[in-house]
Amino acid sequence: MTMTLTNAEQAMVNLLEKHVQAELHGDLETTMETMSAQPHLLNIPNLMGGNDYTGVRNFYSQHLVGKFFPPDVTMQRVSLTVGRAQIVEELVITFTHTVEVDWLLPRVPPTNKRVEIGVVVIAGIHDDKITHEHIYWDQASVLVQIGLIKQNGLPVCGAESARKLLDRSLPTRTL
């Protein structure tokens, strides 16, 4: 199904895409140009991020922009919901853990393991600037995939959850 967006909604999507592309290309200045004067960023699973312009800029410069993305990273959109003041994007991020990924796995050295995770990004937008990002993912799934925790009867999974987001024909877990 193709979504028809208004001009204002398309402008919001374009802003978020510009922001993400700047992050991916290590362009801190363009990343910050997309942000409001008093933004905040919160990675929900590990409480990393920043408050206010300086805090967000410091987080980006020290832990994300130009630092995270292994050469094989891919991001595949699952869904996109555009409201009056925010965008909710659901995506699957896939990469090989060949570099330290501070924002996702702080202080965890590379494991060379493949990681596939479902991620939800909620981006607030006001006056053509991003006011905040709240980013959610299943940290247990990531830790299983890199070998830091074992499933051993725990109600957790690995890459299966991200794969299921992309392919509804895959089976769900049964008890």
Image (cartoon, rainbow, N blue to C red):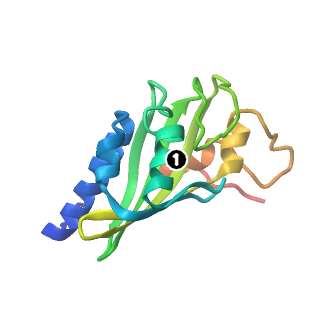
Q: Residue at x 75, y 33 (%)?
A: 147
* Residue 167 shows in the view: no
Q: Is residue 97 left or right of residue 168?
A: right
Q: Residue at x 61, y 59 (%)?
A: 44
Element type at mark 1: helix
Up-down: is 24 above or below 129? above
In the rendered image, the residue lying farthest to the bottom is 84
Q: In the image, residue 126 lies at what x, y percent?
A: 30, 71
Q: Residue at x 17, y 69 (%)?
A: 8
Q: Total of numbered circles in the picture?
A: 1
Q: Is residue 114 left or right of residue 37?
A: right
In the rendered image, the residue lying farthest to the right is 152
Q: Looking at numbered disc 1 in the image, what kind of residue is underneath it?
A: Phe
Up-down: is 115 above or below 172? above
Mark 1 lies on residue: 59
| Quarter residue 90 falls in | bottom left
Q: Is residue 72 left or right of residue 44?
A: left
Up-down: is 154 above or below 66? below
- Quadrant the N terminus occupies: bottom left
| Quarter residue 80 falls in | bottom left
